[in-house]
Every structure is written in structure tokens, then in C-alpha cells.
Image: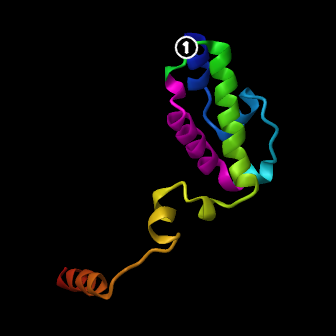
Amino acid sequence: MENFLQQLKELSSAEDFLQYFGVPFDQKVVNVSRLHILKRFFQYIRQEKLLTQTNELGLYTLYREQLVKAYADFVTSTPAKEKVFKVFQDTNGRQHITLDSLKASMALRAAV
């Protein structure tokens, strides 16, 4: 298991993970959703409680299944629709600024 975990630690990009697990991918999908795919992948791992698995081959297989599932989410959808990151969850991707906060910020700048 240490060997598998060490190999995972050496992976840094979405492409690295997809190649390591032998998941075919479209570079265009990865270019748009790379961070979303990885975040969803790790969410799936935590949800399935795969971190407690000890058999390396079984762990590899289960991780691969979760990566395939995470990648597929973004082949058929978009990051904004999937809402993996907090910015999309809270405001549908739009930032809201109240008039009061804008006035307060302007007053602070005028005082300087």
C-alpha cells in the first residue's frame, strides 16, 4: 500500500491522474475542468471511505472507478452546473455586493 500511496503523491495534474489510472480523456474537457475533476475525484474517495482500504490492487481499482466517475461528470456537464467549488455553491457563480458594503468601502478610501 505504501508503494501505491507514494505513486499518488508524485501525481500533480489532472492529466497525471488520468494517465496513471489509464482513463482515456479529451484534453478539451480537462482544459476547462481540471481542478473540478480532481476535487470531485477526492470527494468521491472520501464519500466511499476508500482511504481505509489496504489492498493495493483493490485500492487502485476503486480509485480508478471514482476518477472515471468524476471525469464523466464534466464530460456531460459544466463546472458551474456541478458546483464543486464554494463560489458556485453560494452564488451560482455570481458575486453579490450590497450597496451598503460598497458605500462603506468608498468611505474608507475617501478617508485615506
Q: Quadrant of the N terminus?
A: top right
Q: Residue furthest left?
A: 111
In which quarter of the view is residue 98 placed?
bottom left
Q: What predominant SS class does the magenta segment belong to? A: helix
Magenta stretch contains residue 47: yes
Relative height, residue 51 to residue 68 (above, below): above
Residue in the foreground of this view, choosing between 28 and 106 = 28
**Quarter of the rendering containing residue 58:** top right
Residue 84 vertical position relative to residue 54 in the rendered view, above or below: below
Residue annotated with mark 1: 54
Magenta segment boundaries in residue numbering: 32-51
Is residue 96 one of those drawn in magenta? Answer: no
Give how far across and how far down residue 45 sits, in percent.
55, 34
Which image quarter: residue 103?
A: bottom left
If the image is split into quadrants, where does the C terminus sit? bottom left
The residue drawn where x is 54% and y is 27% is 50
The amino acid type, in three-letter code, at marker 1 is Thr
Q: Position of residue 108 (x, y in %)?
A: 21, 80
71 left or right, relative to 4: right
Above or below 93: residue 59:
above
Q: Position of residue 91 (x, y in %)?
A: 46, 71
- For label 1, the SS is loop
